[in-house]
Image (tube, helix red, strand yellow):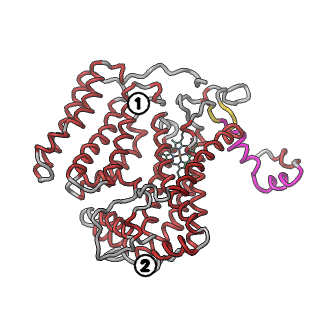
Amino acid sequence: MDTSQTEQKPGIMGWIDRRFPFSSMMREHLTEYYAPKNFNFWYFFGSLLILVLVIQIITGIFLTMHYQPNAKLAFWSINQGIMNDVEGGWFIRYMHVLGASSFFVLVYFHMFRGMMYGSYKKPRELLWLVGMLLYVALSAEAFFGYLLPWGQMSFWGSNVVISLFGAIPVIGQSIAQWIRGDFVVGSPTLDRFFALHVIAVPLVLVILVFVHILALHQVGSNNPDGIEIKEHKNADGIPLDGIPFHPYYTVKDILGVAVFLAIYMGLIFFKPSGWGIVLDKLNYVPANALKTPPDIHPLWFLTPYYAILRAWPSKLLGVASLAAVYILMFLIPWLDRNPVKSARFRGVFVRINILVLSFSFILLGYLGLQPATNTYVLLGYRFTEIFFSTFWLMVYMNRVRSHMATLIWWIVMTGLFVVIDAWMVSVRAHSWGQLLESLWLPIGYVTIILGGAWFKPSLVADKPVPERVQA
Ligand code: HEM
């Protein structure tokens, strides 16, 4: 800290600075934090995520004042107490419920941006890992919160998810029982989920967000061109393509906040149930352990995982593929090892692969919301295959490969699809007739990418990267 400056500084700010590094912190993280000058639309979401975290914590505090974490009272304390008796309670609740969904919309945009611009590559690998931890903590927070209204969907949804742990060999049943605190979901489960939702996980989230921002400011922001602005500095050590975060990006972020709040409030006032996807109609019925609803599914932002789980005829395989999705997402910085960061300067197939990864995830989300009919389950299985393929194709496209390598890649991937299909028939999950009707989907995608790369390597080759960021 520059003590000579703070020693002389008059007034209240001088008094504070001599006791706490307030001004130097503001300088380091705002007015003298140089961010690339070419941030675009995709750079709104980080600050919006912080805003939503604050909204969730504040509305959560007010909801906790009126909520009863008790299996006999929970449902009524929300549906009668908060929604009808507490003044403005409905507004706070809708803010919290739609805030949770907004959180995930924003986080998925935020992650998509990271993938497009290679923001997970050196030196931002740790930033990505902390981001992934945030995503896991966020999913846990939403899962714990969903039990609290104690409606039919809360109760049965939690039952299904907790019983997944039972699929783990040997210790699975004991883990499931340990999580529930009972043999079935009941009062002890509600008590512990309340504690985790209200204090434990929010604390973890706040700490992780601090670490995330510190890690970001250590290495500096990436940008749509994926070029390190720190590599070109002027005589004062200021990046030539950087502008101070404050006031330039604080002003830009205010626009993002205004647009976000308009959409968010619009939904709260006009479509609070989010077309039945955010607030399921089944959750307006109190939990009943003796009446299983015909169609149980988790909240929309976790339904892609649900579709992947249902795609497998074995619960253990389903749980293993869920774990694989998270592991692969954590590993992205080491799967995509091409040094060119931004997809702008990568082959067109790299961009298509990112789009197919995202599209198959969204489609799996849609399929997970549908009843478990044969067609939906089979489509879920095919798009699970396509989703996983995008990660292996990411590895393939690290560089332009030889014809031999391309052929081996194709044989292994398509061979795997056929072998898994044969296994599906052997366990009588589907018939050959049904499987052959849709086998073209994963094989078609892999063949387009690998076939294209075989005949026209420029489709996966890098383009020249400019020295400095573009205006
Ligand atoms: C509560 C959740 C999160 C919050 C509050 C948050 C906040 C932020 C903020 C404020 C920034 C800087 C502004 C910006 O670049 O948009 C940022 C950057 C970044 N975040 Fe997050 N983030 C969260 C979750 C995630 C997740 C889930 C990932 C990925 C797995 C992630 C990966 C990144 C990366 C790679 C950057 C740097 C982007 C670049 O410089 O191009 N974040 N985050």
Q: CA distance from mark 1 to mark 2?
A: 49 Å
Q: Is residue 37 magenta?
A: no
Question: Residue 71 bears which disc, if any?
Answer: 2
| Residue type for callout 2 | Ala
Q: Is residue 8 left or right of residue 98?
A: right
How packed is label 1: few (under 14 Cα within 10 Å), some, or many (20 or more)? some
Instruction: Report the residue that reaches farthest toward the bottom.
Output: 72
What is the span of residues highlighted in magenta in the rendered image? 10-34
Q: Is residue 13 magenta?
A: yes
Viewer-nearest residue: 19 or 101:
101
Q: Which residue is mark 1?
A: 351
**Residue 450 falls in image quadrant:** top left
Question: At x 30% / y 67%, what residue is drawn?
Answer: 293
Residue 71 image point, x, y percent: 43, 78
| Residue type for callout 1 | Arg
How would you classify the magenta stretch by its main secondary structure? helix
Viewer-nearest residue: 385 or 92:
92
Q: Is residue 138 above or below residue 359?
A: below
Q: Is residue 346 left or right of residue 318?
A: right
Question: At x 26% / y 54%, what residue is drawn?
Answer: 310
Q: Secondary structure at mark 1?
A: helix
